[in-house]
Amino acid sequence: MPDEDVRLQLLNEWLDQQLPALFAARGWGAVPHASLTSASSDASFRRYFRWQGAERSLIVMDAPPPQEDCRPFVQVAELLAAAQVNVPQILAADLARGFLLLNDLGRQTYLDVIDERNADRLFADAQQALLAFQQLPMSAPLPSYDEALLRRELQLFPEWYVQRHLGVELNAAQQAAWQRVCRLLIDSALAQPKVLVHRDYMPRNLMLSEPNPGVLDFQDAVYGPVTYDVTCLFKDAFLSWSEGRVRGWLEAYWRQAQVVGIPVQAELEDFLRASDLMGVQRHLKVIGIFARICHRDGKPKYLGDVPRFFTYIDAVLARRPELAELAELFASLPKGAVVPA
């Protein structure tokens, strides 16, 4: 039997054990006949199922050890809930085996519903949730977005995209230029004020919910640069907005952040530059991750969104002359990618 089928069997057995006590404790009556269907999967090893019985709907997370660890999800969920952010409630947990039972925040992500007409309203709600958790004290034992982590992330680009995907070995001059670019991006990130950073705060991880939004996929949270999440929100992996609209949203966030005491940069232009450089760091990382998911994990579909990230970076290169060496490096790379293996 395939490994994931074994896990699904174990998951069903665990649910059979957990649900009667949960229903009794919550006063929900007898456990109804129910179905378990796939709710979503992502680029990691995690899977999500929707348990649907009568009028009640629950979400089950399958996070197989040792590839995944549920404990950070539980820890960060508690942190965000303390800030009144709408995150899944942990209804039952088996951390050793990687099973969580959660309440259901809805069936539609922002990515499913957002368009030109409703974007301002939906992003306004997302900004309020972001501002709420950015005001949390940095007292929990979370990792920091330190130099080592930033550098590991950046290295995914030459390792997986340039070398593995394009089949290119950087020469000594290109390597030196790449290291200077990394130094600039890392220094900019480390110089920023720190807050709690979700690390993947984008429409695919925000649910149309009440209160809005429901926030998911926060288990990799760290303390790090204040511009990270807001840049991620508006320069998404799966949809793009005009430069002018993004600047307007960023400026609105910057003004609101000042009002509520988030430690953003004192000058708008400094904030926008920091956002630009933070975005380049993230986008290089994600290009590398999408290449890795293709070649290591056999999921080539994510490569279809790589051009979007190059477009984001190109827009920054056009207005940030300090990144000229990155522009030259891009120009030296082959335009055509190898066919995914």
Image (cartoon, rainbow, N blue to C red):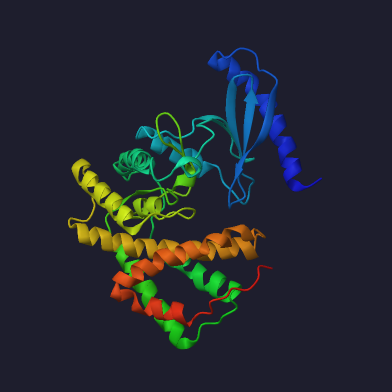
Residue 218, can we see it?
no
How far across and how far down the image is residue 37, in percent?
67, 34
Q: Residue furthest bottom?
A: 172
Residue 9 place in picture, x, y as percent: 74, 36
> Which percent across, then down, holds residue 341?
69, 68
Give coordinates of residue 85: x percent, y percent. Answer: 38, 35
Q: Is residue 229 above or below residue 336?
A: above
Q: Quadrant of residue 55?
A: top right
Depth check: give the residue in front, 277 or 235: 235
Looking at this view, is 10 or 119 the one in front?
Answer: 119
Residue shown at the point (59%, 51%) measured from the top left: 44
Outermost residue to the front: 117
Vertical relation: 181 (above or below) 303: below
- Left or right of 97 on screen, residue 111: left
Name the residue: 43% across, 67% down.
Answer: 151
Q: Quadrant of residue 80?
A: top left
Residue for point 31% across, 44% down: 134
Count of labels in the image? 0
What's the residue at 49%, 38% (across, down)? 74
Horizontal side of 335 relative to 121 (left or right) equals right
Quadrant that contains the N terminus: top right
